[in-house]
Image (cartoon, helix red, strand yellow):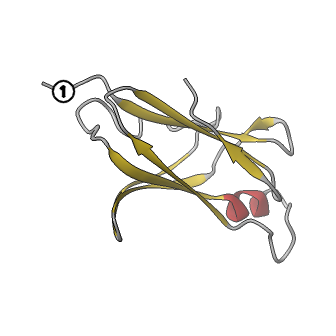
Amino acid sequence: MAGSGRLTTHVLDTMHGTPAAGMRFDLIHAHGDHTHHLKSGVTNADGRSDEPLLDAAQFQPGTYELVFAVAEYFGKLGVGGATPFLDFVPIRFTLAEDAHYHVPLLVSPYAYSTYRGS
């Protein structure tokens, strides 16, 4: 029987004070030195994925990485110049229990932060 674990994300553009609509991302499962690409997506108008990145049926404890295409996103907005400071922003984290994990990204062309949300 599947548990109730799931994984979601939300990206906020702190430069403009808006959700980061249209940002590409990849979800990777990491096994020591090896990685396995699970899915790619693009954030919707609210800066979220349209569905959970991992739902209860797909959820497994382990180490994962979300990689966000920050330079591409800001480049489409005409921000960041020819040589952007941030290119891809990787966030590596561990899912240790069967629970809801929310991994938000707050990002500008020059800085970012994340935390475990609810």
Q: What residue type is labelled 1?
A: Ala
Q: Height in image: 7 above or below 107?
A: above
Number of labelled discs?
1
**Residue 45, how many percent across, how many down?**
64, 35
Q: Which element carries disc 1, helix, strand or loop?
A: loop
> At x 85% / y 61%, what residue is drawn?
78
In the foreground, 90 or 10: 90
Residue 72 horizontal side relative to residue 67, left or right:
right
Residue 52 horizontal side relative to residue 108, left or right:
left
In the foreground, 111 or 108: 111
Tag 1 residue? 2
**Residue 17, how many percent across, how many down?**
84, 36
Residue 97 horizontal side relative to residue 17, left or right:
left
> At x 69% / y 68%, what residue is drawn?
87
> At x 46% / y 31%, what residue is drawn?
101
**Residue 70, how many percent across, how many down?**
69, 59
Residue 98 horizontal side relative to residue 27, left or right:
left
The crowding category of the residue bearing disc 1, from other C-alpha atoms within 10 Å (few below 14, some 14 to 19, many at least 20), is few
Can you say which quadrant of the picture contains the C terminus? top right
> At x 42% / y 45%, what residue is drawn?
94
In the foreground, 81 or 108: 108
**Residue 84, how many percent across, how many down?**
80, 70
